[in-house]
Image (cartoon, grey):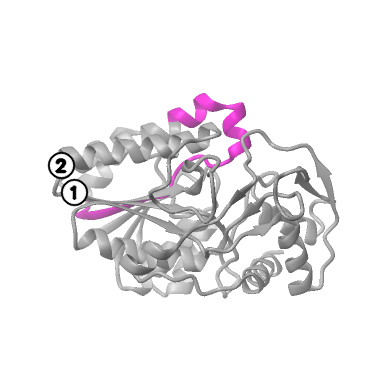
């Protein structure tokens, strides 16, 4: 029986597929390469030295997904596929609601039709909105400040309601924070097709000379240096968390909610300074206006994931920066 990974050629998806293959899982990837590249598939095979089945399909297409489920014995789903840029979601909310919610509807309809009962969802710390305090625990009040976050929160609600209607289903909602870094091989990492929306790929493009300057969106937040504070986690650690979550849903029922982060907060300028120390490369930056929907501070309480999944992030910020730069150097 196989694990279906939607968006498996993407940044987090590709690293998770590697971890699954290395744990001897049978994997099926569905990806339409909206924000990923076909060459990632061969790189996954090279790293894991194992093969997998692949469909270049759009998961919002019911006919295509029916074929995938009909032709394979799918035991569980890890759902990464979706639009993910906060700023773009504010500008194009309809695109985000349509894609991110319809994809979930289609997957759940296929699960009902073909008897698949195990689902791991790629959620986000954005579902906590502007938290009243940090670190953030899983039982904090939920709210959102942008359409991207709202699609994540709505999907969580949809999956929770479906599990209530089907008590033998098992759902894991993984609220992770800010994945950075890359695989040690340098073969796979984050490589957005246009101007990056996230901090580290933006820094990497400045470091490589592809972009002239890093835009720091606001320096008047209520933080130690005025720039936004986030919890950054190595993408390989995050991928390990998904393998542990699959083990959890395979052996239980119910809805299981976990923060995946390090429990430490770094500001934008902290990351710039750490990157410069780790690589010896100076990053030119300028302060610009805040982005719509951004918040001051966000980092995780990770105690529940440690207790119930056995998950602890291992890589420090220095390793995250070095591995991210190593990926750029291997892909010039």
Q: Which residue shows up at 84% across the image and 65% down it?
A: 282
User: In the image, is 101 to the left or to the right of 320?
Assistant: left
- Based on the picture, tell me whether residue 79 belongs to the magenta stretch: yes
Q: Which residue shows up at 35% across the image and 41% down it?
A: 156
Q: Which residue shows up at 47% across the image and 63% down it?
A: 238
Q: Position of residue 320 (x, y in %)?
A: 62, 69
User: In the image, is 284 to the left or to the right of 97?
Assistant: right
Can residue 21 be seen here? The reply is yes
- Of the pair 66 and 107, the residue shown nearer to us: 107
| Label of residue 169 in the image | 1
- Note whether 207 is above or below 66 in the view shown: below
Circle 1 packing at 10 Å, graded few (<14), some (14-19), many (20+), is: many
Question: Disc 2 on helix, strand or loop?
Answer: loop
Q: Write down the residue under mark 2.
A: 166
Question: Disc 1 on helix, strand or loop?
Answer: loop
Task: Check if mark 2's residue and mark 1's residue have beta carbons within 8 Å.
Answer: yes
- Note whether 123 is above or below 261 in the view shown: above
Q: Magenta residues, as a range?
A: 72-98
- Based on the picture, tell me whether residue 22 belongs to the magenta stretch: no
Q: Position of residue 221 (x, y in %)?
A: 72, 44
Q: Quadrant of residue 105?
A: top left
Circle 2 packing at 10 Å, graded few (<14), some (14-19), many (20+), is: some
Quadrant of the frame with the C terminus: bottom right
């Amino acid at each position: 029986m196989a694990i279906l990974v939607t968006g498996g050629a993407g940044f987090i998806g590709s690293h998770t597929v590697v971890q699954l293959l290395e744990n001897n899982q049978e994997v099926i990837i569905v990806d339409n390469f909206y924000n990923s590249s076909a060459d990632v598939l061969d790189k996954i095979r090279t790293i894991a030295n194992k093969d997998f089945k692949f469909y270049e399909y759009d998961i919002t297409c019911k006919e295509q997904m029916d074929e995938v489920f009909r032709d394979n014995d799918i035991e569980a789903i890890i759902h990464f596929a979706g639009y993910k840029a906060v700023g773009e979601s504010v500008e194009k909310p309809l695109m985000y609601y349509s894609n991110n919610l319809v994809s979930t509807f289609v997957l759940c309809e296929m699960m009902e039709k073909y008897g698949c009962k195990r689902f791991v969802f790629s959620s986000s710390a954005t579902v906590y909105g502007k938290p009243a305090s940090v670190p953030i625990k899983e039982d904090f009040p939920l709210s959102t400040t942008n359409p991207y976050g709202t699609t994540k929160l709505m999907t969580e609600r949809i999956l929770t309601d479906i599990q209530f209607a089907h008590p033998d289903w098992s759902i894991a909602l993984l609220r992770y924070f800010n994945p950075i870094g890359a695989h040690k091989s340098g073969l796979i990492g984050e490589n957005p097709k246009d101007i990056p929306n996230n901090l580290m790929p933006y820094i990497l493009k400045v470091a490589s000379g592809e972009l002239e300057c890093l835009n720091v969106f606001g320096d008047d937040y209520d933080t130690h240096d005025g720039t936004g504070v986030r919890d950054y986690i190595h993408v390989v650690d995050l991928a390990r968390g998904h393998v542990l979550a699959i083990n959890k849903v395979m052996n239980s029922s119910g809805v299981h909610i976990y923060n995946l982060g390090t429990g430490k907060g770094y500001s934008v300028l902290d990351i710039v300074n750490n990157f410069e120390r780790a690589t010896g490369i100076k990053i030119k930056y300028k302060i610009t206006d805040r982005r719509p929907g951004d918040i001051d501070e966000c980092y995780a309480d990770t105690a529940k994931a440690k207790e119930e999944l056995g998950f602890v992030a291992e890589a420090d910020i220095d390793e995250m920066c070095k591995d991210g730069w190593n990926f750029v150097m291997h892909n010039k």
